Amino acid sequence: MCRLIAVLVMMGDDMALRLTQKEFEDILAGRKNRAEAPKPSKYHANMEVCQNIKFHSKKEAKYFRELQARVHMKEVKYFLRQVPFHLIGTLYRVDFMEVWTNGQIHYVDVKGFRTPTYKMKRRMVEALYPVTIEEA
């Protein structure tokens, strides 16, 4: 018996849905496909939402809350998130740019794991722009 069964779907001309024998039998039997659990992130960072803003890790969200506290204490005037630096053929975004009350500007990247790509892009940014990227 053929492993694939084509089922015509009334979506347009020449449109067909390809199913395996098991999938076809499941449909006939009324069994629902169980969605697989989402694949964990490469470096096991968990997305977190803080004040309706998605952060790539819990550590980044925690640093965001700390920055808000520093703004409230008047240590930092303001800060920006995901500040882009244009590199040759690519774009690098630093997590935070902080403007302190004494006029200093700090660029901070919140890292749990320093990848070789991150190290290379950080060196490129520091070579092309008059900035120093700090890690938190």
Image: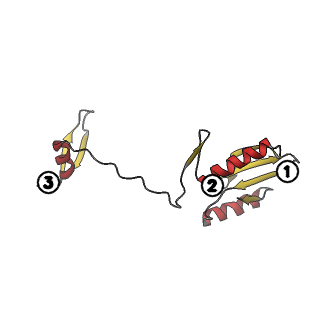
Which quadrant of the figure has residue 45?
Answer: bottom right
Of the pair 47 and 109, the residue shown nearer to us:
47
Of the pair 124 and 80, the residue shown nearer to us:
80
Screen quadrant of the C terminus? bottom right
Identify residue for label 3: 2
Given contact means CB atoms under 8 Å apart, are the residues at marks 3 and 1 in contact? no
Query: In the shown orientation, is residue 41 left or right of residue 18?
Result: right
**Mark 1, secondary structure of its residue:** loop
Query: In the shown orientation, is residue 31 left or right of residue 107?
Result: left
Residue 15 in view here: yes
Query: In the shown orientation, is residue 17 left or right of residue 127?
Result: left
Of the pair 62 and 129, the residue shown nearer to us:
62
Closer mark to the observer between disc 3 and disc 2:
2
Which numbered marker is on residue 104? 1
Identify residue for label 2: 59
Amino acid type, mark 1: Gln
Q: Residue furthest left?
A: 1
First-in-chain label (1 vs 2):
2
Residue 114, percent across and down? 63, 65
Using the numbered discs, state the Cα–Cα distance from disc 1 to disc 2 in whole angstroms. 24 Å
First-in-chain label (3 vs 1):
3
Whether residue 109 is situated above or below residue 29 in the rendered picture: below
Given contact means CB atoms under 8 Å apart, are the residues at marks 1 and 2 in contact? no
**Mark 2, secondary structure of its residue:** helix
Q: Residue furthest bottom?
A: 116
Residue 83 in view here: no
Name the residue at 62% across, 61% down.
112
Name the residue at 75% across, 60% down.
126
Amino acid type, mark 2: Lys
Amino acid type, mark 3: Cys
Of the pair 72 and 100, the residue shown nearer to us:
72
Given contact means CB atoms under 8 Å apart, are the residues at marks 3 and 2 in contact? no
